[in-house]
Image: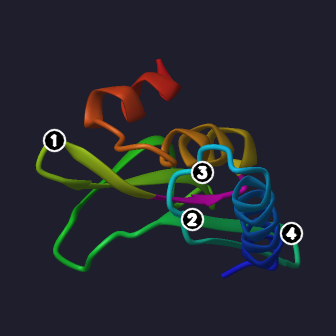
Amino acid sequence: EQWENAIEQGEYAAKRLLAELQGTELPAPFASIPWFWSDQYDRKIQMAGRPSSSDEIIIPDGSIEEQRFVALFRRGDMCTGVLGVNRPRHVMQVRMKLTESLSWDSALSVFA
């Protein structure tokens, strides 16, 4: 996972502590979407979600041959993850939607 997870955990811990001290409603339980990115020479590789090896993989944008694509992982009617090479905008749009249960149709709407 990326270092941002450590930041998110710290922010959550502070919010929870303040809520307890102030006697206000506690925040929802901490839930982070695993993700990472890596810059490898002229390639930006990003992945987010919790895909499984048994998930169906669809490439709705770009192509592997071009080394510029987005792959979505599908389990039933849900999108479980996104992998992108040199497509950071699309990956981030799907990643932000993954914070909640993401329907397959909603994931595909990023590419419409």
Q: State the mark number for residue 42.
A: 4
Q: What is the x, y in percent for residue 112?
A: 47, 17
Task: Give the residue number, with chain letter if any, for mark 3.
Answer: 27
For label 4, the SS is loop
> If the image is split into quadrants, where does the N terminus sit?
bottom right
Crowd tier of the residue under label 2, counting other residues whose Cα lies within 10 Å: few below 14, some 14–19, many 20 or above: few
Task: Give the residue number, with chain letter if any, for mark 2.
Answer: 32
Q: Which kind of residue does numbered mark 4 sit on?
A: Asp
**First along the sequence among labels 2 and 4:** 2
For label 1, the SS is loop
Residue at 83% from the left image edge and 71% from the top image edge: 7
Task: Give the residue number, with chain letter if any, for mark 1.
Answer: 77
| Region of the chain picked out in magenta, as a range | 82-86
- Give the image quarter of residue 45: bottom right
**First along the sequence among labels 2 and 1:** 2
Tell me how far mark 2 sits from mark 1, CA to CA: 21 Å
Query: Is residue 97 toward the left or the right of residue 91 in the image?
Result: left
> Between residues 32 and 43, which one lies in front from this camera angle?
32
